[in-house]
């Protein structure tokens, strides 16, 4: 099974805090595909705000985003665009 995957290093001084986390969850929920964020061996569903906040992603952390599903290419592209513009 093919899955879209990319890595992103957080540049925002506050990391993925409440506001961008909420917006990122909205982006992920806009697609049928399942999107997960992985950091330091822990994984969370990008559609669950509290799980994402619980990851404690800080500036300089490199996270791996994995997207799987019918619209994974569009979903991965939207998430990547959001991260580069906001985090």
Image (tube, rainbow, N blue to C red):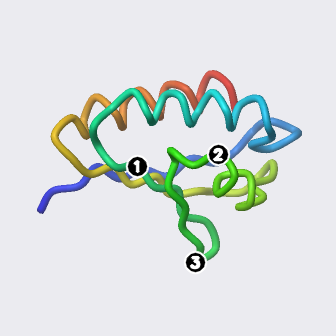
Reading the image, the residue beneath label 1 is 35
Q: Residues within 10 Å of mark 3 (few under 14, many from 20)?
A: few
Quarter of the image that includes the N terminus: bottom left
Reading the image, the residue beneath label 2 is 49
Residue 10 lies, in percent from the top left, at 70, 44
Q: Residues within 10 Å of mark 1 (few under 14, many from 20)?
A: many
Residue 6 lies, in percent from the top left, at 42, 50
Q: Earlier in the sequence, mark 1 or mark 3?
A: 1
Measure the alpha-carbon separation of dots 2 and 3. Answer: 19 Å
Q: Is residue 83 above or below residue 40?
A: above
Q: Are marks 1 and 3 in contact (CB under 8 Å)?
A: no
Measure the alpha-carbon separation of dots 1 and 3. Answer: 16 Å
Quarter of the image that includes the C terminus: top right
Task: Find residue 54 and report its image quarter.
Answer: bottom right
Horizontal side of residue 16 vs 4, given as left or right: right
Reading the image, the residue beneath label 3 is 41
The residue sitting at 71% across, 61% down in the picture is 55
Q: Earlier in the sequence, mark 2 or mark 3?
A: 3
């Amino acid at each position: 099974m093919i899955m879209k995957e990319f890595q992103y290093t957080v540049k925002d001084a506050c990391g993925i805090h409440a506001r961008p986390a909420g917006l990122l969850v909205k982006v992920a929920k806009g697609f049928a595909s399942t999107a997960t964020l992985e950091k330091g061996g822990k994984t969370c569903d990008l559609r669950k705000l509290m799980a994402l906040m619980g990851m404690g992603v800080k500036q300089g952390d490199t996270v791996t985003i994995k997207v799987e599903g019918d619209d994974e290419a569009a979903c991965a592209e939207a998430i990547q665009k959001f991260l580069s513009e906001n985090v």
